Amino acid sequence: MAETIFLSAAMRVILIKLGSVFKEFAIIKGVNKELEKLGSTLSTIEAVLQDAEEKQINSPEVKNWLGKLRDAAYDADDVLDEFFVKALRWNREKGMINKVTQLSSPSKLKFRFKIGHKIKKVAKKLDEIAAERLKFHLKMSELEGRVENKETPTDSFVIESKVYGRDEDKENIVKMLINRSDEDEISINKLLRCGAKESKIVVTTRSYKVGDIARTVNQSYSLRILSDDDCWLLFRDGAFRVGEAENFPKLVSIGKEIVKKCGGLPLAAKALGSVLRDKREENEWLSIKDHRDNLVEVDGSGILPALKLSYDHLPFSMKQCFAYCALFPKGYEIPKKTLIRLWIAQGFIHESSSGERDTVLEEIGNKYFSDLQRRCLFQDVVKDEYGNVKACKMHDLVHDLARVVGGMECMNIDFVDENWIRRIPERNIRHASIVCDDNTDTDRVQEVFTPLHNRSPRL
């Protein structure tokens, strides 16, 4: 899965770079011939990626082919980067006026020969891999990404914090806090004596083990699952605009059947409601209802099917943007501006294919961010004094989903953990973030990551 998500992004980035190289350095004859051949090969492969993504699930051979293709594509990207950066540096130093003279100097000719050899080697490898596709009978198709910038219908949808079905839970928790005896203090209470008198500390967790360790009262309090009626209210708020539900009685009926499969989990109800917000055809709703009998019974990956459905309905480029978020640790407050700029730098965001050439990439990134928030994949947003979103977090279960779909391509590695080296896979990591402290051996980090296809190490 991850191979295809990030591979498609790499293909598009390479093709964009090829276009820039052709325009800026058409004078370099030997290299341009190989670049043209490389572009043709990549376009051919790109057309079959969608079918390969579907077939790799049941075909180890196709999965292995995608792995080899990924490695070769990253080699091509690295060579182009080397060529492009070097050429841009020459232009910046001496300008474009004497381009012929510059590229004809001994050092430039030597570099041209070196890059030409590398490009020929990569192009040959990609040709051989492309030829292998024939034995898998892969179908050529128009990639979804070519229409990925279709505008999402706008409305007055505002993401607010609403609580349904928790009145009884709230009353019970308040009673527990009021009636708690302070006779038996533990060390954490002593550490927090700076709080106001009669202050209470509430620890929330999805783990019973953590609850047992942290509690200072005789018993912890377990929240009940929501009733179908309360789940429906959450689902309805995500799926319909205010007052719109009454205009679609058939969809309401189907929606209530979907809610019954959510198992009383608020996150599942909110996520599925958001998926269906702009869908008004019965067959679109029925496909969710009939997807499986239980939308909260996790499979071997530990991922909620309801969340996986939300991911599956994302436009292709947004899948890349979402999976990339696995770089951040769980519970991390992700700066919005930084995240969008990272998406752009990695080639996940392009100018609109609908002719809006003046659309700023950061504006498209803002739309992606808002849509992921609307689909409940981002939460706990932080706003500035003017109400603009500055940062967000991901629910732990949503982060697990990003980690699974990102695979080994996109990893967060904690170097504070003594066993960090065991987490480094044999296959190439393309994107990695690194959590370290003052005691981390940064030389060792560089030693491990230098041989890898890593494009975004963050120390």
Image (spheres, rainbow, N blue to C red):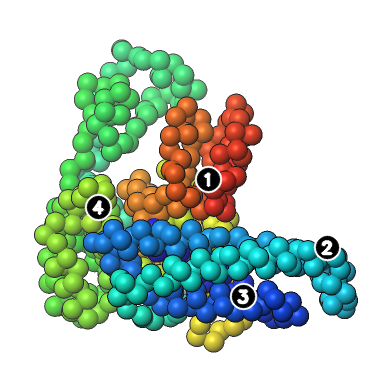
Question: Residue at left 33%, top 67%?
Answer: 53
Q: Tell me the distance, in whole angstroms, between the alpha carbons under discs 2 and 4.
A: 57 Å
To which residue does mark 2 refer? 107
Q: Which circle marks residue 433 in the picture?
A: 1
Q: Earlier in the sequence, mark 3 or mark 4?
A: 3
Residue, far bottom: 355
Q: Secondary structure at mark 1?
A: strand
Q: From the image, tell me which residue sits under label 3.
A: 34
Give me the disc on residue 131.
none
Q: CA distance from mark 1 to mark 4?
A: 25 Å
Asked whether the beta carbons under mark 2 and mark 3 sit within 8 Å of each other, the answer is no
Are dots 1 and 4 in contact, CB under 8 Å? no
x, y percentage for residue 144?
39, 77
In which quadrant of the rendered view does residue 37 lie? bottom right
N-term mark: 1 or 2: 2
Residue 69 occupies quadrant:
bottom left
Q: CA distance from mark 3 to mark 1?
A: 34 Å
Q: Please report the residue visible at 87 percent of the width from the left and 78 percent of the height from the top.
A: 97
Q: Nearer the viewer, mark 1 or mark 2?
A: 2
Q: Is residue 298 visible?
A: yes
Tell whether label 1 touches label 3 (CB within 8 Å): no
In the picture of the structure, the residue carrying the numbered disc 4 is 304
Mark 2 or 4, nearer chain start: 2
Q: Which mark sits nearer the N-terminus, 2 or 3?
A: 3
Task: Report the side of 370 relative to 88 (left or right).
Answer: left
Q: Quadrant of the C terminus?
A: top right
Mark 4 Cα shell of 10 Å, populated few (<14), some (14-19), many (≥20): many
